[in-house]
Amino acid sequence: MRFRRPAALLAVSVVAACSSAPAPETTTTSATTATTAQAAPATTQPAEPSVLTPVIAHAVAEPIPVPATDGKTHLVYELALTNTLSQEVTLTSLTVRAGDRTLLDLPADRLGAWTRLSGTPSPTTVLGPAQSGYVWLDVVVPDGEPAPERLTHALGIAVRQPQPPLIPATLTEEIAPVAVQKRTPIVLRPPLTGPSWLDAVGCCGISGHRGALNPINGALWAAERFAIDYVQLTPDGRLFTGASTDLASFPYYGADIHAVADGPVVAVADGMPEAVPFAAATGLALDQYPGNHVVQDLGNGNYALYAHLQTGSIAVKPGDRLSAGQVLARLGNTGNTDAPHLHFHVMSTPDPLRSDGLPFVFSAFDLQATLPDSEDALSAGRPAELPPPAPLRPQRDVMPLQNDLMTYAAP
């Protein structure tokens, strides 16, 4: 699990617009004058007035609607913000709208919880001079309503050194309109079988996965936007039963990993050694972060990553065509990992990190419960807080959410 005053603002040169040199004398006929007048272009007013937006923004990717186990449809994406001023800007609110509908309204305290400066882990509502940051968004569509076609954002900001009338002390910017993709999430089978599989790190808050915006080859990639880290709990809710540094203490270590759909293998990496649980990985090259792994082409621009696989357990090679449910490897603890788990995600390219993370749903599984956050307890060898026994809740064509505890049937 991984578990001051803007002196340069609008300082536009106008030397080309006027001159002290005398204009040359010219003579024109009335016909020429008439032709020139007729040829003058018509003046077109802009569709909307131009206003200053000191914080500029864009969506990292267009969101794709995905239904989840909470019975709601989620639009999961990130806004990249840049403060263009030479002074601090404080973010005071963010509203996400679809037409005249407000889908998400974040006042300053809630907005700060979803916002980070580039390269820093701490929540914030302040962008320093020329600083950039990100807002991680999970926009939920109200029950029974269709997913919107377009989202707009109203960002409230405040500055300490206003410059009226261009920059008042507080203002609301209309920024970063983004289209909602019409594609639907791919439908898959679960990659594991058996009871009590926990989505320990998943959608849709700011987890280690969602927060991993990777700057690779000159662009920013959110490959792990919908990624799941799977661990299996014992009947009493524990992660391991012996010494935390012993792989044998994790009963699910070595569990079979199943193909989630039909499709060819396009990449395999094997040979990385098993890591000691809870010993932080160091010195990894970029391509070693997934550990031993398999990438499968699922079709229609979807690729599956099965990561941190057990050394020597991978039973497939590039070019092999997998059938849904086929065993392809065993669960391990290789690469950038804290404890044995299966990292699974769907992405837009065969590169595990240089990709855009895509949503997916599982065709059928049973939801046992949704647990309170238990990472600290589990890592310390204590049991998770399990709810009283209750009937399983069958799920169809939905995406698991973080802390969902699930039973997956055999293929």
Image: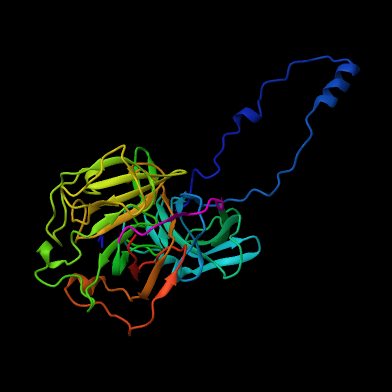
Quarter holding the C terminus is: bottom left
The residue positioned farthest toward the right in the image shown: 30
With respect to residue 240, does 304 lie above or below? above
Q: Residue at x 45, y 43 (%)?
A: 301
Residue 102 can be seen in this image: yes
Q: Is residue 222 visible?
A: no
- Tell me residue 200's x, y (percent): 30, 66
Residue 100 shown left or right of residue 128 in the figure: right
Image quadrant containing the N terminus:
bottom left
Coloring applied to the structure: rainbow
The part of the image, by quadrant, that contains residue 195 is bottom left
Pick whichever, 281 or 334, lies toward us.
Answer: 334
x 85%, y 26%: residue: 38
Q: Is residue 20 left or right of residue 320?
A: right
The secondary structure that most of the magenta stretch takes on is loop
State which region is magenta.
178-192
